[in-house]
Image (cartoon, rainbow, N blue to C red):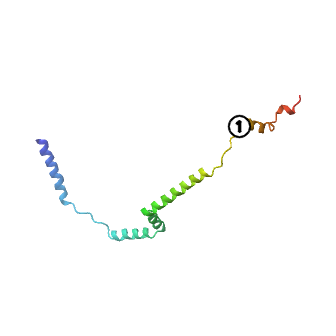
Amino acid sequence: MQTESHHEVNIDLILDSLHGIQSAQPRPFLYTRVMARMERDRSNPWVKAWNFVSTPAITVSIITCLLIMNLYTVYQRTTDQPEVQVESLATATAEYEGQLVSYYAFNDE
């Protein structure tokens, strides 16, 4: 019981200390400064470009175009590849056999 009364006394002391508090006052012309900063940022060309690109319709359109271009590129690579003819090992060996030069062929010692 004593702890409850002790807590109530602490709570009353804390609440009583709040009676003299006044609301915070902003510095003069705060609203004017904030509005001037927002207006200055709004006139920046990079901010205008970002605002245009960040709209959902433009963003979805850009992503869709990139996806279509990627799919087209992949499709072109798969269909335009020439067919590779596989030669037998014997044909490849016969083709390169005449080109091999041994060091010992020129050295008759």
- Residue 17 lies, in percent from the top left, at 18, 55
Please tell me which residue lies in front, 38 or 93: 93
Extreme residue in the top direction: 109
Is 8 rendered above or below residue 101?
Answer: below
Left or right? Give the position of 72 relative to 27: right
Amino acid bearing label 1: Ser
Q: In which quarter of the image is the C terminus?
A: top right
- Residue 10 lies, in percent from the top left, at 16, 48
Quadrant in which residue 72 is drawn: bottom right
What is the secondary structure assignment of the residue under circle 1?
loop
Left or right? Give the position of 86 relative to 13: right
Extreme residue in the left direction: 1
Mark 1: few, some, or many residues within 10 Å (few <14, many ≥20)?
A: few
Is 44 rendered above or below residue 68?
Answer: below
Please tell me which residue lies in front, 29 or 35: 35
- Residue 58 lies, in percent from the top left, at 46, 63
Measuring 14% from the left and 42% from the top, which residue is drawn there? 3
Measuring 52% from the left and 57% from the top, which residue is drawn there? 68
The residue tagged 1 is 88
Is 71 rendered above or below residue 1?
Answer: below
Quadrant in which residue 59 is drawn: bottom left
Quadrant in which residue 57 is drawn: bottom left
- Residue 96 lies, in percent from the top left, at 77, 38
